[in-house]
Amino acid sequence: MNEFTATNNVERPIAADAERYERKVRRSQLSHLLPVQAYDEDTQLFLLNYVLPDAKNTAEHTHLGFGFCIPPLTGISDQVIAKLEGLLALEAPTNTIVQWFMFASPDLNDYVRRTQILRQAETVTLTTTSAAGAATTDQTHDDKRVFREVFSRKVEQINKAAHSGLTQSLTQRAVDYQLHMFVKVPVLSGGSPMPEEVREAQELRLQFETAIKNTFAGVTQFAHSANSYIRLMQTLLNWQPSAEWRTRSDLYDPATHIRNQIPDFDNICDIDEKGVRVNNRHVRTLSMKRLPRNASLWEMRRLLGSADGARGPNTNVLVSWVCHYPDQGSRRTKLENANRINDHQLKVGFGRLIESIGQKAESYRNLFSSLNEGARLVHVWPAVALFCESEDDAIREASNYVNYAKELTIDLQQDTGLHFPTLLNHLPFCTDPRKSAMDFFGRYRTLTTQHLAELLPAVSEWKGTGTPVLNYFSRNMQPIAIDFWDSPTNYNVAVIAASGGGKSFLMNDVLMNYGGLGTQQWIIDIGRSYKKYAEAVNGDFIAFTNDGNLCVNPFPLIKDWQEESSLIVNLVIAMATQKDRLSDYQTASLREIMTVLWTEIGNEMSVDVVADRCREHEDQRIRDIGVQLFSFTSRGAYGRFFNGVPTLNFGKQVTVLELEELKNQPHLQQVVLLMLMYRVQQEIYLGDRRVRKLIVLDEAWDLLTKGDMAEFMETAYRRIRKYNGSAVTITQSYQDLYRNEAGKAIAANCAFTVFLQQSDDVVKALANADNVSLDDWALETLKGIHIVQGQYSEAFWKTPFGQGVARLVVPRFEQLLYSTKGEEAEGIERLCRSGLSTVDAVNRYMEMEAESRASAERVRRAS
């Protein structure tokens, strides 16, 4: 946080200069006002020539430029601010202009395209070698229909979001918050740049690129090319539905000046003192009358919208800072002279009469202190542009935004009569470099790069991990892309989901999206939460019952004792213990006995054989293990589940394993759970490593808290990643993960943690927990995580790629697909019984809902 007051850089020009400048702008074609002529791929430099009518091609107008697109910061630290200060203080030629701007872009094409590419293959054939023998899973075209339908609805939703609100409570358009930085340096030789000027510009570009990579570490930046620059400019100026950028990706023609490739031929630009109309967008610009005394990057982020998404612009917004680097020596000399005059006035007593003299003295002290620490002087012009759908919207949005900025202690005023020149000067590379133009506007302020570092529009909302397998929105409608497999460590996930927090919709959406990619899925559940999902995608729903004939004997499935012994031994330990742990001696002896048995009889080993060998041991402690295993032998109550030929076969892409019926036998339920996890692991290990595997463990947390499960769980979770697998563990409380060693093992091996709605008491407990690495901002954000029934649900994601709030807005098709509400579920089931497929039944139900709404509207109007 820096406190400072900026000083005026220029004096207001005479009226004749203003009239002449405006006249030049108004009578020019739009393309003639854009300076970018050409781009060189070898040097990655743009050639710029700012040519207004009757302007001469002088060194004042010719520049070399370069630019970068930078994923915005989502977190701030003193270290980041220090790096920003260093980036801004890079040595650049006098009269270099650097522009930073954050644009809430309507261009979601790349997000949609990447989402579609992931799902291009309509059918996926999964061939797995079953642990119980050779088995082939052939996922047919019809089985994929639900996945395709859900995906189609998802793309429709994203495209709709770019043009209108998604729900009654989410009226803001979806936007992509893009941070760009453009630099242009004057060509002093005049005309075409000399080789040494090109080389110096290249060196400066490399310095900026290096500093950007260092400052914005962990994210992918790219240098602007001709094509990316044209695309950005077209999204700023071509708003019509037929705009070229909406349908084409390759926009650059090397044979034509770049500036002539930006406005579409049907581009309409009307200018009056009230504002600008660019195609079907009414633009209002606002400039800061004075800079805020207390600077903060977080406050600048709020110009894009409040943290809760409730306040801020309800339209596409551009926040821009034009920064002009003057001659450092001469400018400092002028400021020192002005400071001496101000000090003299203060000493002779004028400060008591004129308050501003004292304020200027404080401002100068801050400024020179910053310069003495190595900062550089810079002239800045901060401005905001609002792109609105109608004149009424523009009036309303501008007024609301001015009031909203006041809440942030930022004084914004509309550029009445100068909306178009202001917009033009804040377009990339388009700042008029002439001193006469800077004098005309009178909006530049002087400050240091140290102060500027906390005023940049460099922070926005979290965008996710990068790959759009899971599609969400931020609170200010930034599309979020998440993929567990983006993680550089492991792909495991811990979901903290209190009752009623939206867990069912979140997990069904996760499973559906990964299912659409052909991911093999196993869900172990207690409570039948995933029965509808299994039925919808033609998966297997397998319920364990006391009178069933399922056998999960682990011993015939063992392939590599050296690799699997730890899991198998821990399975047997779970059979022998319920609450108490075996001693280290007992565990070591049991491991030795089972290793000897494997050497002797291999896969013929059984619980009976292990129990008998333990009972034959000379040590009573080992004989006790044999007695404790009785229930799981062929003579015991649970023996039929664990003796004989394994009958559990995974023949579908999706398998739900339900343990609800065993809830009255918790010991058996726990062992079956562990056996299923081992069985699934066998499928994962023996399957095609190119195919992703996902195992979900839900509503079974208590089963993992009994006995000594830590080694089993840690081994299982570590091994899953090696075979392209992800494990998702769902629990109601974060504290559950740290109540025992098994939970700690899982928590330590989860790269992702997802918090759904939490009570205030839980958040307070998290704040005091030693094992939770959540900063103050995250804890405060957790308090506001909520769900709006029928609209959206929120989750706080903590990932290797940052953290943030993601809103899941489920299309109506998915809502009905997973719905357990009586009327909806019965209606769809009735349609299915009539012969319709699941997809057709849900679509028909949606048609019936639309017909019912239309009928009700007709009745309302008639009355």
Image (cartoon, rainbow, N blue to C red):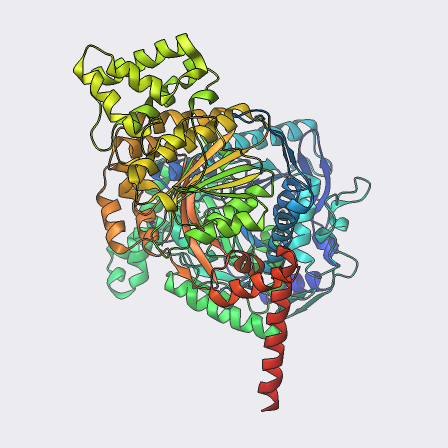
- Outermost residue to the bottom: 863
Quadrant of the image containing the C terminus: bottom right
Residue 844 found in image quarter: bottom right
Q: Position of residue 306 (x, y in %)?
A: 42, 59
Q: Position of residue 704 (x, y in %)?
A: 31, 36
Q: In this view of the protein, can residue 100 be seen by the observer?
A: no
Q: Position of residue 749 (x, y in %)?
A: 38, 30
Q: Position of residue 188 (x, y in %)?
A: 65, 37
Question: In front: 179, or 437?
Answer: 179
Question: In front: 453, or 756?
Answer: 756
Question: In front: 798, or 452?
Answer: 798
- Outermost residue to the front: 635
Residue at 68%, 60% in the rendered image: 239
Q: In this view of the protein, can residue 250 be seen by the observer?
A: yes
Please state if 664 lies on the left or on the right of 179 as rendered: left
Residue at 54%, 60% in the rendered image: 816
Vertical arrangement, residue 670 with respect to residue 323, above or below: above
The total of numbered circles placed on residues is 0
- Outermost residue to the right: 255
